Image: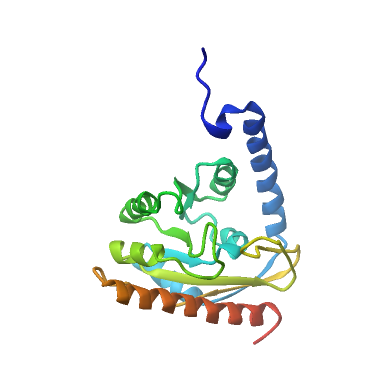
């Protein structure tokens, strides 16, 4: 008897669906992206890390994946994607935007997923990390990114984006999709270095600081998106 691939890969219809989603999503997203008017604050933090050859852990909320994916494209960042159906079409799409991917699940096997990213950072590659993903609660940072920064020496680089006009999905993370010709404001915060070997209570303080930093960045980005000085 022929061996059937496990999960969705065993279904020809699902494989075709993955190819169709990825094949359509990339050109549509790329075309819309070209209409955005970007307003960026804090770019000097990113430039300083690049000049020093310092990999970093780009730290963002799950609900702002799309605009940040578009801005940081073609930089060779590594993103963690799951091995399920959704993870496959996401992987095929973001690789066309110049991302590398590490396959795994931060919810089912968090330790193995973090070790994959740790290996990538030690090869000199920066990573993108959704602090509250993949299932929330929204805008509550999980400890993984802080652990990763402490284990590798790569600083956390918090960032947030807001659009002047956007659709908001009724999902747990309130995913924002900027409408064509919107102003998209991106604010990049100062890098946060995490010393190795911190005790649990100190790592918790860093986690709370990261949440607070992103809250400040969110307020500033919303102001810039709507014309603030």
Task: Give how far across and how far down residue 177 sits, in percent.
Answer: 69, 62
In the picture, measured across the screen, residue 152 lies left or right of residue 63, that is left
Q: Which residue reaches farthest top? A: 1
- The answer to whether residue 166 of the structure is visible from this angle is yes
Q: Nearer the viewer, residue 150 or 95?
A: 150
Instruction: Locate the C terminus by quadrant.
Output: bottom right
Q: Residue at x 75, y 70 (%)?
A: 165
Q: Residue at x 70, y 43 (%)?
A: 24
Q: Which residue reaches farthest bottom? A: 229
Q: Which residue reaches farthest left? A: 197
In the picture, measured across the screen, residue 71 lies left or right of residue 58, that is right
Q: Residue at x 44, y 49 (%)?
A: 108
Task: Give how far across and how far down residue 99 sits, in percent.
Answer: 50, 51
Task: Give how far across and how far down residue 119 sits, in percent.
Answer: 32, 51
Q: Is residue 119 above or below residue 46?
A: above
Render colour scheme: rainbow
- The answer to whether residue 53 of the structure is visible from this angle is no
Q: Is residue 171 above or below residue 102?
A: below
Q: Residue at x 72, y 73 (%)?
A: 164
Rendered image quadrant of residue 202: bottom left
């Amino acid at each position: 008897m022929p061996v059937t691939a496990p999960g969705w890969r065993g279904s020809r219809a699902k494989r075709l669906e993955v190819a169709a989603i990825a094949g359509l999503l990339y050109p549509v997203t790329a075309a819309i992206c070209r209409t955005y008017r970007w307003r960026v604050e804090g770019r000097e933090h990113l430039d300083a890390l690049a000049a020093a050859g310092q990999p970093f852990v780009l730290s963002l909320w799950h609900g702002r994946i799309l605009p940040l994916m578009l801005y940081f494209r073609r930089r060779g960042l590594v993103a963690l994607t799951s091995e399920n159906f959704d993870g496959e079409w996401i992987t095929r799409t973001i690789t066309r935007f110049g991302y590398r991917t590490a396959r795994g699940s931060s919810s089912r096997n968090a330790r193995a997923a973090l070790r994959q990213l740790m290996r990538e950072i030690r090869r000199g590659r920066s990573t993108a990390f959704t602090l509250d993903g993949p299932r929330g609660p929204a805008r509550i940072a999980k400890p993984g990114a802080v652990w990763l920064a402490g284990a590798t020496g790569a600083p956390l680089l918090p960032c947030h984006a807001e659009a002047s006009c956007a659709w908001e999905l009724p999902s747990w993370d309130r995913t924002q999709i900027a409408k064509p010709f919107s102003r998209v404001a991106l604010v990049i915060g100062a890098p946060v270095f995490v010393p190795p070997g911190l005790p649990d209570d100190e790592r918790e303080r860093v986690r709370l600081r990261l949440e607070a930093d992103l809250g400040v960045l969110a307020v500033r980005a919303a102001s810039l998106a709507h014309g603030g000085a």
